[in-house]
Image: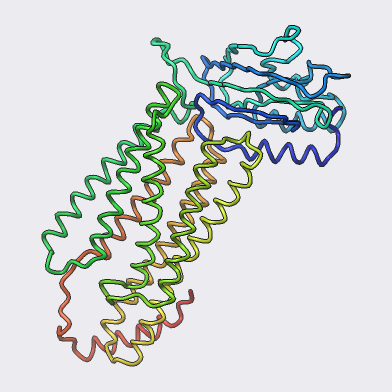
Amino acid sequence: MALSTPSVFLSLLFLFLSISLSFAEIRFTEVRSDERPIIPFDEFGFTHSGRLELNVSEISFSNLNNIQLEKVGFFLCTRESWMHVLQQLEDGDVTCALLSDLVKSVYTFEKLKKDEKSFSFVFNETDADQFTLVFANCFSGQLKVSMNVNSAMYNLDGKSRRRDYLSAGKTVLPRVYFLFSLTYFVLAGLWIAVLYKKRLTVFGIHFFMLAVLILKALNLLCEAEDKSFIKRTGFAHGWDVLFYIFSFLKGITLFTLIVLIGTGWSFLKPYLQDKEKKVLMIVIPLQVVANIAQVAIDESGPFAQDWVTWKQIFLLVDVVCCCAVLFPIVWSIKNLREAARTDGKAAVNLMKLTLFRQYYIVVICYIYFTRVVVYALETITSYRYLWTSVVAGELATLAFYVFTGYKFKPEAHNPYFVIDDEEEEAAAEALKLEDEFEL
């Protein structure tokens, strides 16, 4: 049965465009009684010396009556070409995606000999572009397919002809992650020196900031090793487990740190209010869910039927966490405004209020840049330069860490310093202007 209804076209388009820009590697996939018309596997940026190795075993069909197996098989296609293929199907120019001249047919099942249940095939890709490996079943609703698919996509590197399992445009990422991890280890060393030098004015929050720095450095180091092993062998060799562990710890501690700084814990007050504790009770479990969703997204790949669901859960949870951490900062700003009107210490409260207002703006900018701008860069950047979006995101994160450390570093404040009347009056006038700042 040919694909012809608009609803099917829209679903195929959505499924194809929702493929993650994840790192390609050797992937083993079990497909069981699947009747989906399109099953995307992996997306990969090929150079002029690209290869696809496809090993499929335990092939079985639910029904072969009136089934033309040349309309069942694997093909490679770019996103741009897929848009035109959908238009061809809708116009009736072709009855099956595999028959379109805009896709590169890799293997169709009519090549299988009678009673043959497996095949191995190597496809040489000489056109440099970003392709997606897709399985097409043009008899959706009539034919269910079961099979084990072992796919490997890689580029041959220059004269050495060594295999590079990372997509073109992301092959430099192991070095990028390693350099950023070194940067964070250096920052952690500098922070330890600052804490030792000003140990008399150190609060608990400063040690927590050190823990966040170290976890971030370890997270990047594990990610560098993870991608390095994938680049050379196609497998992570256990580094992905360490990466997930440190990513989980880093995510929880970073959001907790933003909440604690926003509440003024440790350096303004030694306790948390009930509503501030509730924010932590919301953010920490949500970060657990976000990390579970991230693992499911990375490990299952876009072929999984629940992949889109996990992706939506991850995005929703991430947005909720980002919004939740802003509330304590807003509460602190409001409390400082109220205190400024009652305790008569306008100058001191103006300094605190200015600091928290700056931090509020920086947190919003950090969230916006790492969630929106970086995603936009991934979307519009050529596949050859996808590493730039990673660098942009890491630079923004590094800038946020440096700003936080600089603004909230341990300092000796003398509560009895003398402020003359003119300074106090100027601060009071400035506080009136602060009331016009809307959150």
Tell me where residue 239 sits by quadrant: top left
Q: How many marks overall?
A: 0
Could you say where residue 267 lies in the image, as x and y percent from the top left? 25, 72
Q: Which residue does the image show at 32% across and 88% down from the upper left?
A: 428
Quadrant including the N terminus: top right
Return the residue nearer the eye: 378 or 430: 378
Could you say where residue 219 lies in the image, as x and y percent from the top left? 35, 43
Return the residue nearer the eye: 356 or 27: 27
Q: Does residue 216 appear left or right of residue 116 in this picture?
A: left
Q: Does residue 17 appear left or right of residue 413 in this picture?
A: right
Q: Is residue 320 above or below residue 166?
A: below
Q: Is residue 253 above or below residue 15?
A: below
Return the residue nearer the eye: 17 or 287: 287
Q: Does residue 281 appear left or right of residue 352 in this picture?
A: right
Could you say where residue 175 lies in the image, as x and y percent from the top left? 34, 32
Type of colouring: rainbow
Q: Which residue does the image show at 86% across and 33% down from the upper left?
A: 4
Tell me where residue 303 sits by quadrant: top right
Return the residue nearer the eye: 426 or 342: 342
Q: Is residue 355 above or below residue 18?
A: below
Q: Which residue does the image show at 17% across and 54% down from the upper left?
A: 192
Could you say where residue 173 lies in the image, as x and y percent from the top left? 40, 33
